[in-house]
Amino acid sequence: MVARAVFVLACGAAIFAAAKRPAGQTDALFEFHSNPWLNLHQLLCAQGERAAPPADMPDAERAAWNQGIAFYARYAKRNLLFDEELLKIKEALRHVETGTTLDGVAIDVGVKATLERLMPVYRKHWWPAHDRSNREWAAAARTLVDRHGAALNAALARAYDVTPDNPVWVDVAVYAGPLGAYTTTRPTHVMISSTDPSYTGDAALEMLFHERSHAWGRTLIDSLTDASTSQAVKIPPQLWTPSLARVNRERASTSPVALRWTSSVSSRPEPSA
């Protein structure tokens, strides 16, 4: 919540100060990817959520898909953000976006065999639609980042007192965890859903920079925690949110887009990752 508060304050100031921004900012800030291996892996971790087998799916393919779901059941209840094995799998698959096999990829042999066995089935029944969804989401996000990205990046850099390590690698996927997005660091890698209705329109811009900020938020949280401990006070669970929401609503009164965006920020619970 603290990171969300800093984000709203910084980004509110940046957006309202700029009526028009030059195009072409996205490539300097974000690098969008639509990776079939990562999409398949994420779907299997979710036990096939958002990938219901079609009615005319051949029995052999249906059986293979169900076997893959059963194999991945061991990962279904693990945390995508904190489980070491899942983090290693994600990082390994990130680098084989255009690969036709997983030769040389250092992941569990069972995971590798399952993904390679199911990839032809996935490409046949789901990937064209999923890839289109991912690319359409990225294209829509690019329009917003091209307009507001430089100002938002500068505002966040000032707020966190950092030099951003841009561009940030963003994998767009049909499923990106139960919250629709999560971020790992060293290097910063954002996973975000193209089908989560909470992350469309202006909220896509907010979520990109919110997720990107997780690489810096820990420093801020640690500083606040140290300060509160030294003064024997408890940090309120929603620090700054009410006052920030009011200030940003007032500043947004001349901008319908920013008003809708600020409303979504203040009303939606913050992802934990």
Image (cartoon, rainbow, N blue to C red):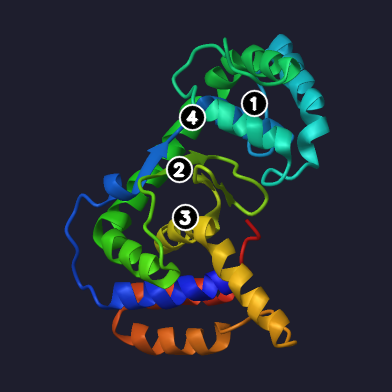
Q: Earlier in the sequence, mark 2 or mark 1?
A: 1
Q: Position of residue 85 (x, y in %)?
A: 72, 33
Q: Earlier in the sequence, mark 4 or mark 1?
A: 4
In the picture of the structure, the residue carrying the numbered disc 3 is: 212
Cα separation between marks 3 and 4 = 19 Å
In the picture of the structure, the residue carrying the numbered disc 4 is: 35
Q: Position of residue 70 (x, y in %)?
A: 81, 25
Question: Where is the C terminus found, in terms of image quarters?
Answer: bottom right
Q: Residues within 10 Å of mark 1 (few under 14, many from 20)?
A: few
Looking at the rendered structure, the secondary structure element under dot 2 is strand
Asked whether disc 4 touches disc 1, contact meaning CB atoms under 8 Å apart, the reply is no
Answer left or right for 186 relative to 71. left
For the residue pair 227 and 106, the one nearer the viewer reads as 227
Query: In this picture, is 189 found above or below 116?
Result: below
In the picture of the structure, the residue carrying the numbered disc 2 is: 170
In the picture of the structure, the residue carrying the numbered disc 1 is: 54
Asked whether disc 1 touches disc 3, contact meaning CB atoms under 8 Å apart, the reply is no
Cα separation between marks 3 and 2 = 9 Å
Q: Nearer the viewer, mark 2 or mark 1?
A: 2
Q: Nearer the viewer, mark 1 or mark 3?
A: 3
Q: Position of residue 262 (x, y in %)?
A: 45, 76
The residue drawn where x is 34% and y is 72% is: 257
| Badge 1 amino acid | Pro
Looking at the rendered structure, the secondary structure element under dot 4 is loop
| Badge 2 amino acid | Val
The residue drawn where x is 37% and y is 65% is: 157
The residue drawn where x is 49% and y is 61% is: 210
Q: Earlier in the sequence, mark 1 or mark 3?
A: 1
Cα separation between marks 1 and 3 = 36 Å
